[in-house]
Image: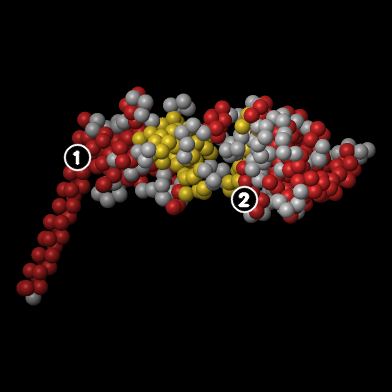
Amino acid sequence: MYMRACCCFLAVAVGLEFSALELSADESIKNQVAKDIKNERYDHLGRLLRHNVGKKLSLASLKAMAKKRDAKPLLNAIDATSSIKKYHTNLDCKSPELLQTALFIETTLPAYAKKHKYYLSKQRTGLAHTVEYDPTHDTTFIVLDGKKNYIGKGKKKTVHKAIHYTHSHPKVVARAVDQVKHSREHSLTKKLHGSPGIYTTVGFGKNTKGGKPYSTIYSKLYRPGSLQDALDKKYRLSTYEKMKVACDILEGLYSLHKNGIVHRDLGARNHFIDIPRGKPGRRKVSASIADLGRSTYAVRAADTKVQGNTTYTAPEGLYRKKLKGQDYYKTDVFAVGCVLYRLFYNKKAPWQEKSYVKDTKRSLYSRYKSMRHAIKRASKARRTHLATKRTKLTPREEFELLVLRMVHTDPAKRGTAKELSAKMKKIFERVQ
């Protein structure tokens, strides 16, 4: 009995000793945090937080300490970290690492920016994440790696998620990296930044890695993504919502053409769409034109391929080896017409399914004739009926007629981006 009592007493004593040591360690961390805040030793504070927040120091207790000492940079970093983890739960990143990076942005980044050092790799700073700053648009980004943050890969670009940093409203964006210092896409996208109907860009960057130059475009993250994805996954859209998509895309086409730019790759994959949750009806759907990798100025477009995807090529582009620069405006209109045709009818345009489009064994003229015949067979009768109808067309019929005009075999009868955009807006106003 005596021995058992002694053992119990010893166990309690040891437990109390460990508790005291643990309490002492926690108090030591808090004291060091307070000291670093007071002396504005933010580099040391960041490392301290990265290794102790969530283990020996909770984010809530840290925020209480920051409030008590009126440490605004730390409070901003805590708010940003909390917001990111609350609203973006599928990111492959840890809170302590984000907190350290946020504190760096709040306190140390301005000094680097003054020295014109805008791309700060994690190897250079010792952070868990690379930080990039765009001085032109005064925007800062936290670069994310890892499989969960991978979005996709194109012919030249790789796309990952990144965080557009602000302490009050940080957002997850897409970061497209191209292995070239000054790409045509980069410069044209910069030129069209903020233009109606063009995908929303929020920043640009450039850097050198392993001796190779890279250019970066940061843009809004669209859900579900490309219009191709939405169509393939059979997202349901009401006529009202389809009209809104058409308005946005045609406005984007006008933005391109009024700046003298032809896109030359206007398949459904290169249109982005945002579809809010809920049933089809009057949701705030939005769409835009994206991926300017093949875009160029119309005056320089002669003797180049009409569309990146052959199935969206206008008949004259399939047959004629040479087009004048201005002709490319009409081939852009035709390609968008093919996209809107599928959007309106919920199926691909019949002429896009035919083997002759890519049948290199047939002569170009033979393929051209077959394509014109298929287009006329699929659109002429309905277009003529709508155009000659005696009663006033409904908004839906006007929308259909506009789409059928855009895929006319005669380029002169397709209309310009300016005319089509204005007409689509008037149609849409009738259903609002």
Task: Report if residue 420 is visible in the image.
Answer: yes
The residue pinned by badge 2 equals: 229
**Quadrant assignment, res 416:** top right
Q: Nearer the viewer, mark 2 or mark 1?
A: 2
Give the residue at x 58% y 29%: 192
In the image shown, does 252 or 314 lie closer to the viewer?
314
| Quadrant for the N terminus in the image | bottom left
Which color scheme is applied? secondary structure
Image vertical order of residue 19 relative to residue 400, above or below: below
Image vertical order of residue 256 relative to residue 358, above or below: above
Give the residue at x 44% y 33%: 206
Task: Report if residue 79 is visible in the image.
Answer: no
- Give x and y (percent) for residue 405: 81, 38
Give the residue at x 39% y 48%: 93
Quick check: 393 left or right of 81? right
Looking at the rendered structure, the kind of residue marked 2 is Asp
| Quadrant for the C terminus in the image | top right
Looking at the rendered structure, the kind of residue marked 1 is Asn
Farthest-out residue, left: 2
- Give x and y (percent) for residue 67: 31, 34
Task: Using the numbered discs, state the Cα–Cα distance from disc 2 to disc 1 in whole angstroms.
Answer: 53 Å
Label total for image: 2
- Give x and y (percent) for residue 204: 48, 32
SS type, badge 2 = helix
SS type, badge 1 = helix
Farthest-out residue, top: 114
What crowding class fits label 1: few (fewer than 14 Cα within 10 Å), some (14-19), or many (20 or more)? few
Which numbered disc covers residue 31?
1
Are the two marked residues, 2 and 1, in contact with CB atoms closer than 8 angstroms?
Answer: no
Quick check: 277 left or right of 335? left
